[in-house]
Amino acid sequence: KLPALKGDVIYKNICKDEEFYSTVEGDFESHIIDHNKGEVRCQRCNHFDSATLVTDDNYKALGLTADYVGMYAVKNSSNMYWISEKNAENPIRNGVVLLEDITIDSSIEEWIPMFVDYTDFTFDGRGHTLTINLDFGSEQKSADLALFSTFNYGFIKDLVIKGSVKANTTANVGGLAGSAYRSTFERVISYVDVTNNCETGGRAGGLAGYYGGQMDTANGYYSRILNCAVYADVKGCE
């Protein structure tokens, strides 16, 4: 929102390539985000901090291998919110790799579940822990709800998840995905309690609320869960 005081001079500023308006003139190279306080938006421009696109030039500096080129590297919660926002505008096809343990908390910033429908999308935790505290409210909904709403054809691997997901939906709720079609979960350990408070019709699951889709005749599976474990309370509809 722009200041409305008479006589104010309003400047169009740049904060790490994000435009914003202020009564203070400046051109800043970085966002101000206090990650220790759980902040995810810049205190100046109110935008998220963008994740890093892995390239041939930077993958070694990020501690990665060339296999990750083309993916987005996430080092904090703000990066993950930026991924969700960007995916809603223009789908991210090559995937995401975690560089650090991060937390997604809907009490701090509303989380918009990501929709994934690409055969080359991989969410690689690299052994890191993703803490998920998502409460989608008590009002009944009809959408798949979780970190990912629907996760189709992709891979989620080498990840530990903790926290809770709460919703009231006639669709599906999961620790990671509302629904998963012809996808693979590999080496994922979940400590996420999942609750779907819908009175009838909805599902809940430790990793995904529902698995399915048309049979992949080439590989012979709907969805695969390989070397995963769930240590959590999961409650679906009565």
Image (cartoon, rainbow, N blue to C red):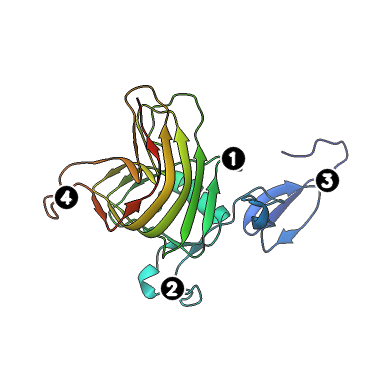
- Could you say where residue 59 lies in the image, as x and y percent from the top left? 45, 73
- Could you say where residue 143 lies in the image, as x and y percent from the top left? 39, 31
Please state which of residues 14 and 162 is positioned toward the viewer in this rendering: 162
Q: Which numbered disc flags the more N-terminal residue, 1 or 4? A: 1
- Could you say where residue 39 lies in the image, as x and y percent from the top left? 65, 50
Q: Which numbered disc flags the more N-terminal residue, 2 or 3? A: 3
* Crowd band around label 1 with a 10 angstrom C-alpha radius: few (<14), some (14–19), many (20+): few
Which marked residue is nearer to the observer: mark 2 or mark 3?
A: 2
Q: Is residue 150 above or below residue 217?
A: above
Please state which of residues 78 and 191 is positioned toward the viewer in this rendering: 191
Which marked residue is nearer to the observer: mark 2 or mark 4?
A: 4
Element at badge 4?
loop
What residue is at 38 percent from the left and 27 percent from the top? 142
Residue lying furthest right: 7
Which marked residue is nearer to the observer: mark 4 or mark 3?
A: 4
Numbered circle sitting on residue 128: none
Q: Which numbered disc flags the more N-terminal residue, 1 or 3? A: 3
Residue at mark 1 to residue at mark 3: CA–CA distance: 35 Å
Q: Is residue 168 visible?
A: yes
Question: Which kind of residue does numbered mark 4 sit on?
Answer: Tyr
Numbered circle sitting on residue 221: 4
Q: Which numbered disc flags the more N-terminal residue, 2 or 4? A: 2
Numbered circle sitting on residue 107: 1
Q: Which residue is mark 2?
A: 64
Residue at mark 1 to residue at mark 4: CA–CA distance: 37 Å
Element at badge 3?
loop
- Asked if the residues shown at circle 2 and circle 4 are in contact, with their CB atoms under 8 angstroms apart, the answer is no
Q: Is residue 160 above or below residue 207?
A: below
Work out which quarter of the rendered image holds the C terminus and state it.
top left
Question: Which kind of residue does numbered mark 3 sit on?
Answer: Val
